[in-house]
Image (cartoon, grey):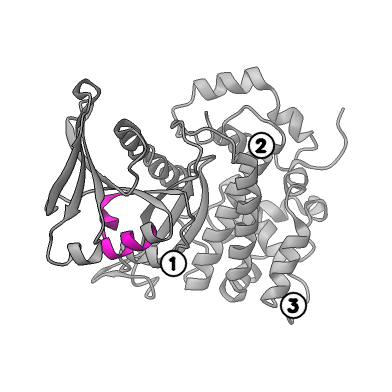
Amino acid sequence: MYTGRIVFSQVMDHMPIQTFRSCVQRYHGNRQVKQFTCLDQFLCMAFAQLTYRSSLRGIEVCLRSQQSKLYHMGIRGKVSRSTLADANEKRDWRIYADFAQSLIHTARQLYQHDEFGVDLQQTVYALDATTIDLCLSVFPWAKFRKTKGAVKLHTLLDLRGNIPTFIRISDGKLHDVNVLDEIIPESGSFYIMDRGYVDYSRLYFLAQCGAFFVIRAKSDLKFRRVYSRPVDKSSGLRCDQTIVLTGRDSKTDYPIHLRRVKFYDSKNDKLLVFLTNDFTLPALTISELYRSRWQVELFFKWIKQHLRIKTFFGTTENAVKTQIWISIAVYVLMAIIKKQLNLEASLYTILQILSVTVFEKTSIFQLLGEGELLKQLDSNSNQLNLFDF
């Protein structure tokens, strides 16, 4: 019989504690703190994510009912909803943002050789944003519409492992395309975007940096065909052209050649037109790259279903950003554990098991390593599952 540490402690063993302390020290997170430290705050919030708590009172009641186990969870301060609310409001959210970025760096190294459905050696990113609705009277800083508040989660997703590499939390009024100014392009990488990101001066900057993009064209595209390549229309392709832009502003903003690929999606009865600055990949691969952009949509649906980012424990901007960044850190930490322990279960199944076993003294590998049983559970699940390849 296993008589070691509780499951929650085993999960947090995968957390790089020295990196976390460096993040806390960088922003003086524990200055004038006597009892409830930033680590206590993170562990309480991580517990809320893993066990699907939806309120500060729920966190307090659950943890206080297991008072004798708090020390073994790593929580040293007294848990109360007022203390946790105060910490979320005042502790700098950048502590948890930097820590999440550190975990992301680790996760990307673990998943860098994974496949994502397209036979391509280069790194492929999908860029998109999702809106999280808020009540404007409760969150007055989250401007969106006249009578509605919201925050936007702008995400650049590495499709190898579905790891978010860039995250920007803004109010709902920020247009998606402005986030391109904050992304540092990687030479040789592909950036897959929807037509909401069409801005030819920004796309030209990506091209000048040696990066490639695949983006859906707008219906009012003005261009002149320079050259056409033969295509196999039975594959869904309709044309593969080299073009120059002829619009009044676009021809100045993007003065070099573009590639235009038209593809008919028979499944959805849609005619799609893509623009790219890559002239070497087969046209069908270009359309497959754009199809892989759907992974970022699945990512947004998944985190909204399984992480606590729709109901917030505080109303200030700092509290909201703190909760979102800690939820991202927990998501990535689960991805790291899945890879390091070589688990076959989906992330959904892992989280469901952990949610009811965090206080048990059972080996985490014993809980999550029953391959055939967990495969059967996954096959019977109708939930969105990430990390299934």
**Among the 4 quarters of the image, the one containing residue 343:** top right
Say which mark, if any, is on residue 339. Answer: 2
Q: Residue at x 73, y 80 (%)?
A: 31
Q: Is residue 346 above or below residue 259?
A: above
- SS class of the residue under badge 3? loop
Q: Amino acid at mark 2?
A: Lys
Q: Is residue 123 visible?
A: yes
**Cα distance between the residues tagged 1 and 2:** 30 Å
Q: Amino acid at mark 1?
A: Glu
Residue indicated by mark 1? 182
Q: Main secondary structure of the magenta part?
A: helix
Residue indicated by mark 3? 33
Residue 199 located within the stretch drawn in magenta: yes
User: Which span is picked out in magenta?
Assistant: 192-206
**Cα distance between the residues tagged 3 and 1:** 34 Å
- Front in this rendered view, residue 257 or 65: 257
- SS class of the residue under badge 2? helix
Asked if the residue under mark 1 is in contact with the one under mark 3, i.e. CB atoms within 8 Å, the reply is no
Q: Which percent across, then down, holds residue 323?
A: 54, 61
- Front in this rendered view, residue 377 or 86: 377
- Front in this rendered view, residue 65 or 14: 14
- Of discs 2 and 3, which sits in the foreground? 2
